[in-house]
Amino acid sequence: MNPSNAPERYYNYAYLDEQTKRMIRRSILKALAIPGYQVPFGSREMPVPYGWGTGGIQLTAAIIGPEDVYKCIDQGADDTTNAVSIRRFFAKVADVETTEDTGQATIIQSRHRIPEKPLKANQVMIFQVPQPEPLRGLEPRETETRAMHAYAEYGLQYVSLYESVSAYGRIATGAGYPVMIEERYLMSPSPIPKFDNPKLNDSEAVLLFGAGREKRIYAVPPHTTVRSLDFDDYPFEVQTWEQSCALCGSEDSYLDEVVLDDAGQKMFVCSDSHHCAERREAGHAGPMAGHALDQSKEPAQ
Amino acid sequence: MNAPAGRLDVEPLLRVTDLSKWYGHVLGCRDVSFELRPGEVLGVVGESGSGKTTLLNCISGKLEPSSGLVEFDTYRFGLKNVYSLSEPDRRRMQREEWGFVHQNPRDGLRMRVSGGANVAEPLMYLGQRHYGKMRQATIDWLERVELDTRRIDDKPRNFSGGMQQRIQVARNLIHGPRLVFMDEPTGGLDVSVQARLLDLLRELVRDLNLAVIIVTHDMAVARLMADRLIVMKGGHVVETGLTDQVLDDPQHPYSQLLVSSVLQI
């Protein structure tokens, strides 16, 4: 940091130029005003390929300020390649403090998970979305899905649930489980597990969704009703596990199955790495506490 | 012939007045007028390029006519010009009160979801949210169109052409429409399958007291299904009348040609 160039530092701050950030901010405001509605925006080329979080990065770049504390997770973990490089990117271009601590962060960018720790009112959650259109798998025409959203014709979405029940005897959709926002707009919650769907409802934090390739932004403002679709006789359910976290013993967090060797050994661990670490520090221990995977604890970059 | 079908003392279900459609300078169809009453089956016959499909698309709300009126007796608004309804109202009416059986089942079915889901889809559009009830209704309808209910979860591509067409028929009747459009429903099928499907359609139409507009170039289909016929040539209606009347005693030279050119064995 060089104090002599302080004024220049905040011109074209956070990688994007000022006009682009303005355009994205306008789209965000529109998205917040119409919860669940997909606002088209002029998605820019980013220094990572489509599918690596270009939508989320653009949202973050548009709203981040020097006072923010930034956290980035991928599949719940702070230490995966993609999360680390995006976090480094913003540490470099936006001069922000980064953290792994969910409670400290003001902006949390995520792919696939919402942290276990309940979000607070001063936080913004940013989701990277590969396919913003929940109806796309059933209706390939954009003109038709737009009309369906405009007239709230959402019978079609139930066809996918019907297919799932007839094939598996239950609604087997595990991630990207479609939700209704304020009983008006059908929305894809990005590929978060349906375990996290209840956290969307009446959230304290602002939830922003960005799809870079598909050029759409949508949002769920705080305290918005978010209902997961279901049938009367097949109600919405979240995933449950017979195991608890092998390292921290948590029984109510989302668990990942980790294969340990070729002999079929495996363990279940919290997908939210910070949640797990915090619990272990507080003295909680699971059946495999002290395992090699328990040792490594790298600091946030 | 079914006695109460098309009785004149009943209000018309559909009224088409002076309907014309131009594609730029090319004529699609011109000055077509007719009325259709509940339970009546109207056949539209003519050679290819005579404007049959244009007419059907105009009536079924898919293609706005250049001039003329298409009025339908809607549940919610009464007799109303289809094209004066707002788009959401028109789409809703099409979903709730109409059915459309395409010539090619691929146009009328979702090929990526199972046959059962295809049949149940209209119920979901109507707000049914109980899986068990939908499943039962689907099974009932598969039985009704004489399909093996054990194959309910097969994808449409795994069914033969005739079976796909039966799925399409079930899908278009399950929600209890009052008017069904059929565009060459037996077009791509071999003769024996065609005969059985026609038999089935005829039975369903009578049982449900459906009004049907069926477009076909096949005189045998027209003879079996239709109460009344419209004969089209070059976009114009050249003759109308009761089916037996038109086919047994055609007045217009073109109708005479059409009837006389049916192959005899």
Image (spheres, coloured by chain):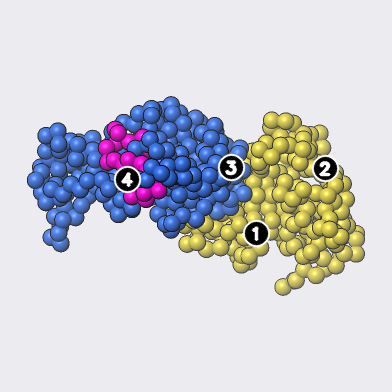
Chain colours: A blue, B yellow
Chain on which label 3 sits: A
Q: Residue at x 69, y 32 (%)?
A: B75
> Which mark is nearer the camera, 3 or 2?
3
Q: How far apart are marks 4 and 1 (CA)?
A: 51 Å
Q: Distance between the residues labelled 2 and 1?
A: 26 Å
**Who is closer to the viewer here, B219 or B135?**
B135
Image position, residue B10 (x, y; %): 78, 34
Image position, residue A68 (x, y; %): 37, 36
Q: Amino acid type of disc 4?
A: Ile
Q: Amino acid type of disc 3?
A: Met
Q: Residue at x 76, y 41 (%)?
A: B83
Instruction: Report whether B62 appears left or right of A168.
Output: right
Q: Quadrant of residue B4?
A: top right
Q: Residue B103 carries which label?
A: 1
The answer to the question of whether label 1 and label 3 lie on touching residues, with beta carbons closer than 8 A, is no
To which residue does mark 2 refer? B69
Instruction: Give the mark nearer the N terminus: 2 vs 1.
Output: 2
The magenta stretch is A87-113
- Are discs 3 and 4 both within one chain? yes
> Which mark is nearer the camera, 1 or 3?
3
Q: Amino acid type of disc 1?
A: Gln
Q: Which residue lies furthest to the bottom in this view?
A: B265
The answer to the question of whether label 3 and label 2 lie on touching residues, with beta carbons closer than 8 A, is no
- Are discs 3 and 2 both within one chain? no
To which residue does mark 3 refer? A148
Q: Quadrant of residue B258?
A: bottom right
Helix, strand or loop at label 4? It is strand
To which residue does mark 4 refer? A73
Image position, residue A122 (x, y; %): 38, 29
Q: Amino acid type of disc 2?
A: Leu
> Which mark is nearer the camera, 3 or 4?
4
